[in-house]
Amino acid sequence: MNDSGGKTVTSPGETHAHVAVYPGSFDPIHLGHVAIVERATKLFPKVIVAVLENSSKGGLFTPDERLEMMNELWADDPAIEVRSFNGLLVNFLRDVGSRIVIRGIRAVSDFEYEFMMALMNRRLYSDAETVFLTPKEEYTYLSSRVIKEVVALGGDVTGLVPEPVRLRLEERYRKATHPPTR
């Protein structure tokens, strides 16, 4: 491992317990996600927020737009790196030299799915470990799906998403509900 411009560089296959990966679609990112990232940086000196490029999901924002929004949030924090990935998470873990997966658990209903995924990841990559973090109480009900539904119906998500994300959401839905006329 060496340091190159503030970024940790690892050789493929080299793993470091101090690098954690927080994967997700983050479409859009909300303050529950942000709180998980902030808490993860208290446990690990480096957190990679890994944006899944899931073409089958057909997101509201493209992976590049999501990367841009998150890079704006954490541009000044050397402990947080934002990257995209596709395919198996365990392959991404190996590529970035990590074995730690961060997952947020809002309620018991999240646990069954997340537990299954943690076991499958460990089956595919025996060194993989999943660390479950709970969000701040005020964000336990948040999900990207709920955020999108509220904005689509004209609701205000101030205080639920970072301000630049709120502005982009409103602009995106305004264009969808009021397309330009010719």
Image (spheres, helix red, strand yellow):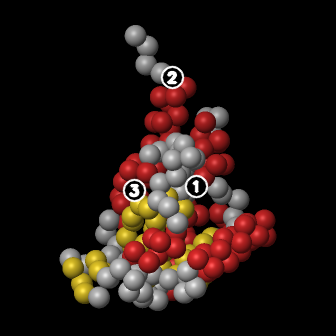
- Whether 96 is drawn above or below 65: the answer is below
Please identify the quadrant where the N terminus is shown: bottom left
Label 1 secondary element: loop
x and y percent of residue 74 in the render?
37, 66
Q: Amino acid at mark 3?
A: Leu
- Whether 177 is drawn above or below 103: the answer is above
| Mark 2 or mark 1: whose residue is earlier in sequence | 1
* Few, some or many residues within 10 Å of mark 1 (<14, 14–19, 20+): some
* Few, some or many residues within 10 Å of mark 2 (<14, 14–19, 20+): few
Residue where numbered disc 1 is placed = 160
Q: Amino acid at mark 2?
A: His
Label 2 secondary element: loop
Image side of residue 97 versus residue 43, left or right: left
Label 3 secondary element: helix
State the separation of the CA atoms marked 3 and 1. 19 Å
Please identify the quadrant where the C terminus is shown: top left
Q: Nearer the viewer, residue 23 or 37?
A: 23
Q: In which image quadrant can residue 126 be found? A: bottom right
State the separation of the CA atoms marked 2 and 3. 26 Å
Which is closer to the viewer, label 3 or label 1? 3
Residue where numbered disc 3 is placed = 67
Which is closer to the viewer, label 2 or label 1? 2
Residue drawn at (78%, 65%) of the image = 109
The reply to whether residue 167 is visible in this rendering is: no
Circle number at residue 178: 2
- Whether 5 is drawn above or below 23: the answer is below
State the separation of the CA atoms marked 2 and 1. 24 Å
Residue drawn at (25%, 87%) of the image = 2
Circle number at residue 2: none
x and y percent of residue 135 in the render?
63, 71
